[in-house]
């Protein structure tokens, strides 16, 4: 699990960035479309090389967490990814906790780099 401190005490503000396609499009992918329980993430421009992946929403609780599974991992039940808003009991400050499935240590290191980059974008676009 990766934990990223946030500059807010409002779970609603964080939820607006993680709980729906419009928020995720601001910092995770160039385009995110939500259709029922599926989110489609697209990176790149239409006229250049693009990458599109779908993730099924397994569960979500407003102002708390969203849990998903990429379509290419459907044969691996433990292969979920989750973004969870956690509050420090002592300070009241919020953190975004990321759980993401990795097959091995090399993939785990790659995912850590991806999430570090994503959170840098989140901080930049939202001030969180």
Image: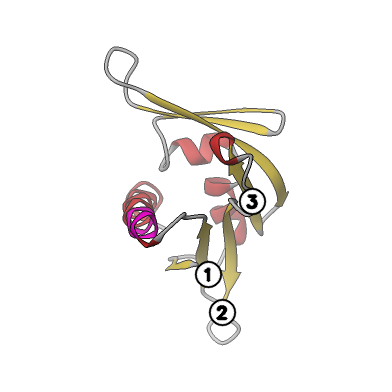
Q: CA distance from mark 3 to mark 2?
A: 19 Å
Q: Which residue is mark 3?
A: 66
CB within 8 Å, label 3 to label 2? no
Q: Which residues are magenta?
A: 106-112
Above-or-below relation of 120 to 35: below
Could you classify mark 1 by the number of other residues whose Cα lies within 10 Å: few (under 14), some (14-19), or many (20 or more)?
many
Q: CA distance from mark 3 to mark 1?
A: 16 Å
Residue farthest to the bottom?
90
Helix, strand or loop at disc 3?
A: strand
Q: CA distance from mark 2 to mark 1?
A: 6 Å
Residue 85 pos. (x, y %): 58, 63
Q: Is residue 95 left or right of residue 20?
A: left
Q: Which residue is mark 2?
A: 88
What residue lies at 51% left-to-right and 60% top-to-bottom? 98
> Is 101 covered by the magenta stretch?
no
Could you classify mark 3 by the number of other residues whose Cα lies within 10 Å: few (under 14), some (14-19), or many (20 or more)?
many
Q: Which residue is mark 1?
A: 94
């Amino acid at each position: 699990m990766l934990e990223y401190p946030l500059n807010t005490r409002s779970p609603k503000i964080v939820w607006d960035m993680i709980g729906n396609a419009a928020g995720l499009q601001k910092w995770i992918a160039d385009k995110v479309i939500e259709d029922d329980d599926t989110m489609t993430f697209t990176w790149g421009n239409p006229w250049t090389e693009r990458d599109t992946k779908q993730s099924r929403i397994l569960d979500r609780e407003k102002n708390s967490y969203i849990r998903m599974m990429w379509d290419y991992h459907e044969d691996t039940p433990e292969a979920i990814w989750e973004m969870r808003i956690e509050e420090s009991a002592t300070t009241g400050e919020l953190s975004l906790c990321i759980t993401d499935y990795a097959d091995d240590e090399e993939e785990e290191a790659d995912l850590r780099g991806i999430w570090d980059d994503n959170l840098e974008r989140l901080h930049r676009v939202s001030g969180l």
